[in-house]
Structures are given as C-alpha cells and as structure tokens.
Image (cartoon, rainbow, N blue to C red):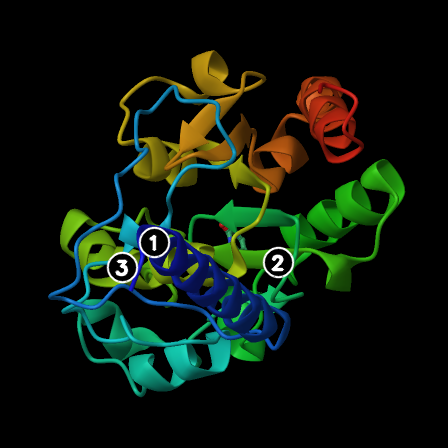
Amino acid sequence: MSAANDADELAALAMTLKRHLERRRRAGVRVSPKADAPQAKTVNSKNDSSLGGAVADLFAATTAGAQANSLEELRAAIGDCQRCKLCSGRTHIVFGVGNPRAKLMFVGEGPGRDEDLQGEPFVGRAGQLLTDIITKGIGIKREDVYICNVVKCRPPENRNPEPDEVAACEPFLKKQIDLVRPEIIVGLGKFAVQTLLKSNAPISKLRGKWHSYHGIKLMPTFHPAYLLRNPADKKLVWEDIKQVIKELNGENA
Ligand code: URA
C-alpha cells in the first residue's frame, strides 16, 4: 500500500475512533485509565490555572472504585464501607448529591448530625446557608450543582477527620471529581481546602484566589458553619462567589 493510502486509512480510523468516543461521551460513558495503559501526562501543578488538565490520573487504577464509570458505580464500590473507624458511629454514608455533570461542585469537610441522619450533605443549618448561596447568590438550583465532602461518614462530635480517615476516603472524593469533572470546585472551609490543595496555609490566606486542583479551577472560601458564627465575613464569601459567577459566565476569558 502507498504512503498516501496509509495516511488516508489512518485518517479514517482516527475519525471513526473520534466519533465512537464522542458517542460514548454523550452517553455518559467515562474512560478510566487501565493499569497497563500508558498514563496521560499529568497536569497537577498546584497553581496551574488550566481547566483542560488531565484529571484521569486523579485516581489510582488499583483502588476500589477505580473502574467505576458513573457515580452509581462508585457508590456501589464503596458498599457498606468499613475502611476506617468512622464506620462505627455512622447512621448513613453521605456520598454526595446533585447533577452528575455539574459545572460547579462544592466540597465540604464531612457530614454533621443532620447529614448523618438524612444521608445527604449540607442539610442542616450550615447546609441551608449553602443552599441560599447557591440559589439566592449564584441564582441556580441546588440540584444543578454537585455537593459532597472529603469524608463520607460523620466524625464523632463533629471533630476534624483524622489523617487515616482522610487517607481511606480521599480516593473516593478524587474519583467523584474525576467522574463529575466540574469546571469549578468551591472548597468550603479550611479542612476541605487544605486537604484538596495539600497545603497548611490558613483559609484566610487561601480564600478569594483561584487555585488549581489537577487542572480544575478551585476557589476556596469560608465554610458556611463558620459564617453562622461570624456573619460579618459573609461579605468576603460573596466576593469569592462573585468570582465564581464570573468564571461560570465566561467573563474572565
Ligand atoms: N459541614 C460539612 O462540611 N459538610 C456537611 O455535609 C455538613 C456540614
């Protein structure tokens, strides 16, 4: 076969593959990296502001749930989780709620009492404030965004999750982010933001500026529970949220 024929055949194959992947993408099928496949180049610099970064590397292919192609499959892989000591005190695993294809994702610390009882994140007083931020502030429905936490089970007395608990649960958060692939993540409060960014900096220094989580834009802001105790800082959160709105509207392009 001539070089020209080879090139034509290659182009046709590439087009077929592209159409096939596009159909799978529209059908909601995600492509998970196989353990033996060459890895995509990782864009994981903490300050890389590119939204196009590879996020497929977020989740080690050997961890439970790695092959999940949907949030339902990931939830099934978590099962009746006993991977850390938080399982002993929980009522429900609080996996996450919202639009599986949301452009905007909120990540909190871990379920509180109300969330543990109802099995849904951010449904207590702090959750009501978050809902107001989404509906009254941003002007979209709560169901349009995706909401989850770093750890999926309530820590006793709402203490901070401990390192072994985060280590057990973080792969599932990463996979959730990989599956939803939001354009923007809003990190709620010091604990969630420090966990996502692997930073010890105070939330007062991190908030209000764009960061990158494996190529996804991340805006840290204060936790709604903190705002209930410090309502004067609501105006700072509003500043952060205005930046998120601009980004969602493409006004920063
Ligand atoms: N605080 C959190 O961080 N998450 C919740 O789901 C509720 C309160």
Provide the secondary structure element on which disc 3 rests. Answer: helix
Provide the secondary structure element on which disc 1 rests. Answer: helix
Residue designated by label 3: 171
**Mark 3 is on which residue type?**
Pro
First reached walking from the N terminus: tag 1 or tag 3: 1
Front position among marks 2 and 1: 1
Q: Residue at x 27, y 22 (%)?
A: 200
First reached walking from the N terminus: tag 2 or tag 1: 1
**Mark 2 is on which residue type?**
Tyr
CB of mark 1 near ligand 1 (< 8 Å):
no
Quadrant into which the N terminus falls: bottom left
Q: Marks 2/3: CA distance?
A: 17 Å
Front position among marks 1 and 3: 1
Packing grade of label 2 (10 A; few <14, some 14-19, many >=20) is many
Residue 225 visible in the current orientation? yes
Task: Please tell me whether residue 236 is drawn above or below residue 179 in the rendered image.
Answer: above
Residue 157 visible in the current orientation? no
Residue designated by label 2: 146
**Which label belongs to residue 56?**
1
Q: Give the camera-side residue of 207 and 222.
A: 207
Task: Please tell me whether residue 132 is drawn above or below residue 167 in the rendered image.
Answer: above
Residues at marks 1 and 3 touching, judged by CB atoms closer than 8 Å: no
Q: How many marks?
A: 3
Provide the secondary structure element on which disc 2 rests. Answer: strand
**Mark 1 is on which residue type?**
Ala
First reached walking from the N terminus: tag 2 or tag 3: 2
Packing grade of label 1 (10 A; few <14, some 14-19, many >=20) is many
Q: Determine the residue located farthest toward the top in the rendered image.
A: 205
Q: Position of residue 124 (x, y in %)?
A: 65, 60
Query: Would residue 50 appear left or right of 48 to someone viewing this image?
Result: right
CB of mark 3 near ligand 1 (< 8 Å):
no
